[in-house]
Amino acid sequence: MPPYFKNKSNLNLFYEIFNGHEDDKTPIIMLHGFGSSAGFFQEQLRVLKSEHKVVVFDAEGHGKSEKNSNEKLDAHLIKDSIVDIEELLYILQVDVPVVLIGHSLVGGGIAQQFALSYPDKVKCLILLNSGTFLIDNTIRNIFWNLLPQVVRMEFNELVLDNIEILLDKTIPFIRGALLGDQESTEFGFDRLDGIVETEIFDMIQNPLDPSKIQCPTLVVGAELDNYAPLWMSKDLAEKIPNSKYRVAAMCGHFGPNHRPEIYNKLIFDFLEELGI
């Protein structure tokens, strides 16, 4: 029977813990992206688990974890996951600062927000293919995936000044993706469209501000990433005071899985530099 823990919403969330080397005093918590699962980190686990205590878990509604059937369309995975990490650390009796490794805009966003909320609980951050936009629910994820590669690469220049026009064109597609063949919704079309507009405007106007992150941070961007383009990682590194910025050459968004030799070396070198 796989291990699960109950979160504050009384949902069963899947987790695994690898005890690693007995002398290891700094647990590593790995945080997957939106629509992914703990299995994404299999190539990192393969090399990390022999030397470190590593914890992975499936976020609510992902992988083997339960989904809240009462969840609203505007529920936010980052906010919920912060509480879930607290609960998991308490259950595992982890009372020392941890390493957080987050992938993509959501896994990296969770890591950033946790470090901002609980600086004394985080020893360092490793942010892979990440940024500051909070694309952490279904509406925002659909919107982001509707943007072609060239728009995401030039997001600030092309989108911010034309957001109302872009919303007029994308809302029908977002509505269709959310409702499928349903002709009506408990929210009503007008209310649903209002929720979509609110979510997108909030995503654009209120990104994370990582400038107050205090711990050492490694930011890895991927040269060929068209989901979280390289400029996002560079911008993230520039905003975090005590950070190192590295580029994974000829890698895309799923580089940690597709080119693990590159990412694993960057992770190990950073941990070794910090004496972890």
Image (cartoon, grey):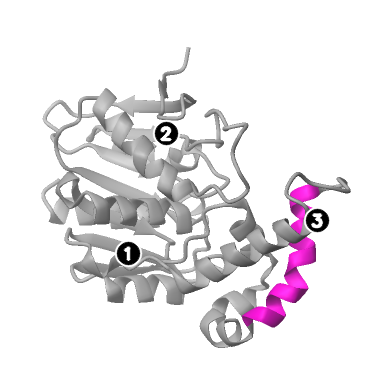
- In the image, residue 54 sits, relative to residue 215, either above or below, namely above
SS class of the residue under badge 3? helix
Which residue matches tag 1?
Answer: 219
Which residue matches tag 3?
Answer: 176
Which residue matches tag 2?
Answer: 57
What amino acid is at disc 2? Phe
Instruction: Name the side, left or right, on which 89 lies relative to 146.
Output: left
Provide residue 72's location: percent of width, then percent of height. Answer: 61, 44
Cα distance between the residues tagged 3 and 2: 31 Å
What amino acid is at disc 3? Gly
Cα distance between the residues tagged 1 and 2: 22 Å
- Outermost residue toward the top? 1
- In the image, residue 86 sits, relative to residue 166, either above or below, namely above
Q: At 60% from the left edge and 86% from the top edge, which residue is drawn?
A: 158
Q: Is residue 179 visible?
A: yes
Q: At 54% from the left edge and 44% from the top edge, which residue is drawn?
A: 36
Q: Earlier in the sequence, mark 1 or mark 2?
A: 2
Q: Residues within 10 Å of mark 3 (few under 14, many from 20)?
A: few
Q: Earlier in the sequence, mark 3 or mark 1?
A: 3
